[in-house]
Image: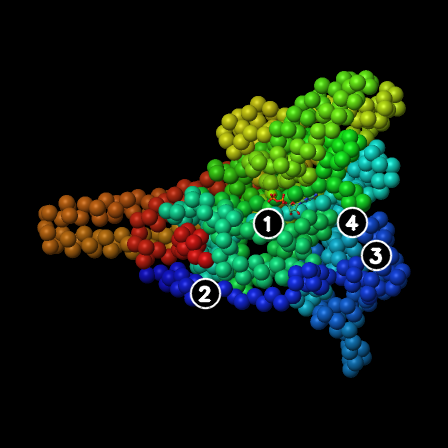
Amino acid sequence: MSRIRFNALQETLNRNPLKVVQNEKRSSLFGKNVFNKFAMQQYLTRAAYESVMNAIELGTKIDRKIADQVAVSMKDWAISKGATHYTHWFQPLTGATAEKHDAFFESINGSLAMEKFDGEQLVQQEPDASSFPNGGIRNTFEARGYTAWDPTSPAFIYETTLCIPTIFVAYTGEALDNKTPLLRALQAIDTHATAVCKYFDKNARKVSATLGWEQEYFLIDDALALSRPDILLTGRTLLGHLPAKGQQLDDHYFGTIPARAMAFMQDLEQECMLLGIPVKTRHNEVAPNQFEVAPIFEEANLAVDHNSLLMDVMEKVSRRHKFKVLFHEKPFSGINGSGKHNNWSLSTSDGINLLSPGKTPMKNLQFLTFFINTIKAVYENEELLRASIASASNDCRLGANEAPSSIISVFIGDQLSEVLDELENVTKGKLSPQEKTDLKLNIIGKIPEILLDNTDRNRTSAFAFTGNKFEFRAVGSKSNCATPMTVLNTIVAKQLKEFKIEVDKLIDVKNLKKDEAVFNVLREYIKESKKIRFNGDGYGEAWEKEAKKRGLSNNKTTPEALQIQVSKEVIDLYKEMEVMSKVEIEARYEIALQEYTKRLQIEGRVLCDIAKNHVVPTAVIYQNTLLENTKNLKEIFGGEYKNIAKEQIELIMTISNHITGINALVIKMEEQRSKANKYTGLKSADMYCKNVKPFFEEIRFHCDKLETMVDDNLWPLTKYRELLFTK
Ligand code: ADP
Ligand code: MG
């Protein structure tokens, strides 16, 4: 009998929900461990406070003297809350977060000691970051990397460490992290969206992108997860037969949250409150043991930081509750996967949501402007948007059998489609007074009342308009939102820039009135970007065919999807928008390919190991039992045994076939791996994708068959039903 599986099961039976003390109201916990406006007002001088606020709102530099003041206050605040260490907290290109803790403590002359932290330490650090991926940037330039304070995301205390959000760049200025390009993209969208806003509001000053992510995840008992080498090393199951009951009854979605998971959520939410992560929503997801957490949306840079932080905190809190949290996009084959919907919009500094229809025709024209420009941007850059969410793990979800497709399309609902259809017929050039009135009253005027209720009933679309925001649904649950947010904001910024040029031209050259010019350009955009709009079922094969006819890309694998990132158009786009240089783009491309290859390499190794060292030996043991039994039957019944032991004999042969199958496939896969390992970059990634990965399914097939045949008492790997249905 395999002990680890049964010991693990025994352990789960003895678990009880952890008691979570909830004495304080959420609102009074909120932001307690964040050096936010409120804390700054208390601890900073007026001059320092204003300087930091200007840096946040206007992007101005903070001078050294002020930085020293801020550092000292930040330290006093942190120490008053029990912090002993500080760290620059950043997001290297591993997709995770990185931190290196230093104590505030410093000795003076060897005998005295004090707590110290000054502006220099706040503003810039040089972590020994030689083993973070850099895609050749630091080798080429022989430069080191440093981290630099990002005042727009407030410092916070986690456990006993003051964490200072920073960017991570090479000395030559190239970004080595996810935050730097995001900040540049947010700058671009601010510039170009504000310029367009001025058509509608002369006083428009600043536009920020907003992001509200929805994080899906699985909670699996710690002991059970640890009993599976595949979950431990790859974050997903590489084999396992579907249980008799999966999610077919739809009885988990929005159901009662199991007690242990509830305790985990309460604990997590309290931690989030202290850290200022405004989590609000929690519920069961479609699959058993799958859940979701979502916050109130925030400015995009902060929201991205908060999502990264949340994922760290979830791992830590889950350990207390004897869970392993799985962020992988497809931990279980045949069971719903996990995504991270990115709800995105644009907001002015006055808090006006630019993707929300307003009360007046003018406000609605503004809404339509941003709405249509976004659709056009997605149409022009659908392949780049697809690339922004590509990863080995998200490939298991996108474009796979039961999952959302890898085609990017935009869902806007029937009623907004009708509005766009009508706008398509706007007269070219000057509009008659009659037409203007008609537009204002009957088309644009109708928008507000139809929205909210009638949108968002199509969950199969990769990019859906949901009443007052777009929801990018194809983002993977494991990924850092910075990458898709960088792309989305960059492409919309570029689109708005073009829009402004075209409208201005019509006003200046053709003497059109502002609203006539806007209508004229929008009309063309609606026509040009029609192909990206799709309100039907995005999961079906029919849509794949239709999308192909429309010329939309359908890149099902990461190596295919990533290639657009290094195309001339994309390099030009990033350059024009000042988001990334060619060197930075190429470095990221290399890193992404490497990461992909390594993930598949690890999965291949783990699968071979499990198949050879767990599954085959177990099958042999069981086969021996059958052989023994057959031999005994022969001894007692003589020639009759062939009838009596018919089932056993068949089973012995079937088991043999599967064992032979596994052994042969494992050898073939190993050969393909060695071949692929001789190459690097795209070639290697491509070989892993085309020549190695297909073996995963084939090997799995035999293993899963054996799982259904071999005595349950012998089976060493915790089964799907146990992973999914133990609470
Ligand atoms: P669901 O998509 O599950 O029906 P909601 O539509 O209520 O849920 O909201 C999902 C997410 O969208 C939440 O995180 C919410 O904060 C976010 N959201 C709402 N408005 C905006 C906005 N203007 N910009 C960005 N995110 C938003
Ligand atoms: Mg949603």
Q: Which mark is residue 15?
A: 2
Circle nearer the viewer, 4 or 1: 1
Q: Quadrant of ligand 1?
A: top right
Res 124 visible: no
Q: Are marks 3 and 1 in contact (CB under 8 Å)?
A: no
Crowding near the residue tagged with mark 1, few <14, some 14–19, many ≥20 C-alpha atoms within 10 Å: many
Whether the residue under disc 4 has CB within 8 Å of ligand 1: no
Per the model, the C-alpha gap separating discs 4 and 1 is: 32 Å
User: Which residue does the numbered mark 3 point to in the structure image?
Assistant: 52
- Write down the quadrant of residue 517 in the picture: top right
Question: Is there CB contact under 8 Å for labels 3 and 2?
Answer: no
Determine the CA span between mark 3 and mark 2. Answer: 48 Å
Between the residue at mark 1 and the residue at mark 2, the CA separation in whole angstroms equals 26 Å
**Quadrant showing the C terminus:** bottom left
Of the residues shown, which amino acid type is indicated by label 1?
Answer: Gln
Residue identified by numbered label 4: 173
- The residues bearing labels 3 and 1 have C-alpha atoms spaced at a distance of 31 Å
Report the residue marked by disc 1.
215
Which comes sooner in the sequence, label 4 or label 2? Answer: 2
Residue sitting at x 18%, y 48%? 645
Query: Disc 1 on helix, strand or loop?
Result: strand
Residue 76 can be seen in this image? yes
Q: Of label 3 and label 1, which has the lower sequence position?
A: 3
